[in-house]
Image: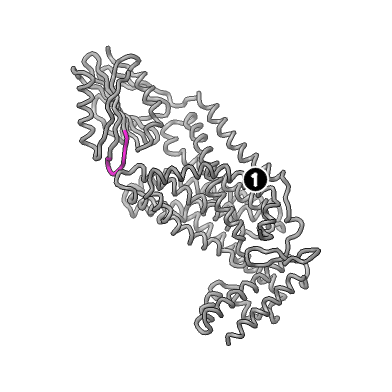
Amino acid sequence: MNQSGQPIYTTRGAQPRPFPGQRALRTSWRASMMLVSVMFGWLIFTFALAAIAAPNDPNVEVPVQVGLGVVVTPADGWYSAADDWEVGPNAVSFQKSGALVAFAAEEFAGTNDQLLTAQLGFIEQDFESYRSLPASSSTVSGDLPGLTALFTGVSSSSRLEGELVVATSAGTGVIMLAIAPEGQLSRVQGDLGTMLDNLVVPR
Amino acid sequence: MGAGAARLTRQPAFWLFTMLLAGCFLFVGLEQVFYLASYPGAWLLSVLLLAATAIPAGLIIYRFDQFEPEPTSLVAIALLWGGVVALIFAGVTNSWLLSFLQHVMPATSVDSWGAAIVAPIDEELYKGAGLVIIYLMARSEFESVMDGLVYGAMIGLGFQVMENVQYFMLAAGESGVGQAAPVVGMFFLRVVISGLYSHMMFTGLMGFGFAYLMTQRDKPLGRRVSMFAMCLVLAWAAHFVWNSPWLEALMSQGAGVFVLALIIKGLPFLGLLVLLGVFAHRRECRAFAYLMANEVGSDVVTPEEFQVLRSGRRRRKSLRWVKKHKGKPARLVCKRLMRAQMNLALFHGKVESGDHPALEAQRDMIRQLKGRLAAFG
């Protein structure tokens, strides 16, 4: 529809319209580059903030008495879940971003295998569609041999995954049970490992 | 390629948009493939439910600007910016900013307030960048505050739809009771109950302010900047209040109270956006009357036709009348006639003299359409 010389029409969909003036024809790269600089600048700025603040820690991880001489130090960002998860005497619970973990201590004279089997039996009762992987060996409190089992199941209409770690020492059984929405446990497993490593267990 | 598209490809901003879209699309595409492979039923249900609500919502927003509907190419760019580019950039910066907060704030505060602090800053920034890029691509399409409101709401709609897919898939993943129930539950919560108070509203507010700054050049600069700053703060505040844990205690006291709490959090800002929308619509009506002043009373637009053109309700009523008494083909011609008459006002706004060839050609087109309509009897 454009005529020779100064065009009077441009098509926009099915509707013809007057041709816009030269002002609207082309903008410079400068404005676009400024925009992209702001976008990537903010991206880099937030990355730098996160990196600079990483060694910082406003949450003073005060060691918490679990009971029977067992002491746990919550990892960075974990705080008490006592209001959400009542775990009884000789036990404490923590939470972070939807994941929960409980540490418990009880008098126990058996082996790691026996303690694990007993605990998995309790857990199975609380879950539907319960499945667990075979237990693997691990260490607690630095060098104390323990056993770890991963499991999944449904509780209160939510599919959850969990990690159970047990160890026994000097007549005391130490249990760590962590639960998180399916797919979320791996995000906190580093923290769980740190807490298990730093656990104080009577020898 | 149409002239409009050819014009877009001459803009550096268009190529910038294309590059950002291509990069971000890789991430969004992979994410969707993962969802489809992991939860096929839930993913398909999500797409169906969101399409069933987002398409009507998009059409309603598109029709806000009844005197000059925005070009579909720019509307598509707005949706893609919100749903792909802004979503990816905001997703990355949200996680980094949250990580920063976790190292400078108590853990309990971050769990409660992290989303309220982080999301408005990052998400409004990147959605707002979409308004700037559309402006850089097609300055001539940013003519009124209504344009900003429409583009802003479209960017917000794109963002909201893709974010909802993420939430629906998360719900499906966390649930052990099948894939449909959690998706429907989340759909009810995020779309049916609170869909109006979400990103469409936040970015609509920002779009209004941005368009006020860029288009109202007859107003003092200080006033334009103040209005932009106010809308920016409002968009941020609406997002902050919505994400904040305020009224959480109320929300756990039953479904009715839960809905009431959501209304308390969202309705004041929605009401404000509606007020701004009414303000923008009135300005459009005044501008339309001003631009058509020299045409009304001529053979092109009669005073009666002008009164009909000014109101969407009267236009729809007229079209229904024509369809009932003259048939469906006559209704189609009448609809084209109305659009051609309304475009006349648009053309007046873009040319300097009343006898510009584009205006004359448009008047001829209107006369032809009137002749065709008269032929229906």
Q: Is residue B93 above or below residue B167?
A: above
Q: Does B355 lie within the magenta span?
A: no
Q: Amino acid at mark 1?
A: Leu
Locate the N terminus of chain A and report the quarter of the image it occupies. bottom right
Q: Does A158 lie within the magenta span?
A: yes
Say whether residue B114 is visible.
yes
Q: Residue furthest bottom?
A: B377
Compare residues B246 and A41 and report the one nearer the observer: A41
Q: Which residue is mark 1?
A: B16
Q: What sort of colour scheme is used for the picture? A: one colour
**Bounds of the magenta segment:** A154-161
Does residue A152 appear to the left or right of B195 in the view shown? left
Count residues near mark 1 (Cα–Cα under 10 Å), then give few for <14, some for 14-19, many for 20+.
some
Compare residues A71 and A36 and report the one nearer the observer: A36
Give the x, y percent position of residue A2. 74, 65
Does residue B163 appear to the left or right of A117 in the view shown? right
Magenta-drawn stretch, dominant element (helix, strand or loop): strand
Q: Is residue B376 above or below residue A134?
A: below
Which SS class for mark 1?
A: helix
Chain ID of residue with mark 1? B
Give the x, y percent position of residue A87. 26, 30
Q: Residue furthest top?
A: A203
Give the x, y percent position of residue B29. 50, 45
- Residue lying at 62% horizontally and 44% vertically, measured from the top left: B19
Q: Is residue A37 above or below residue A103?
A: below
Give the x, y percent position of residue A95. 36, 32
Locate the C terminus of chain A and report the quarter of the image it occupies. top left
> Looking at the rendering, which quadrant does residue B76 occupy?
bottom right
- Residue lying at 62% horizontally and 72% vertically, measured from the top left: B339
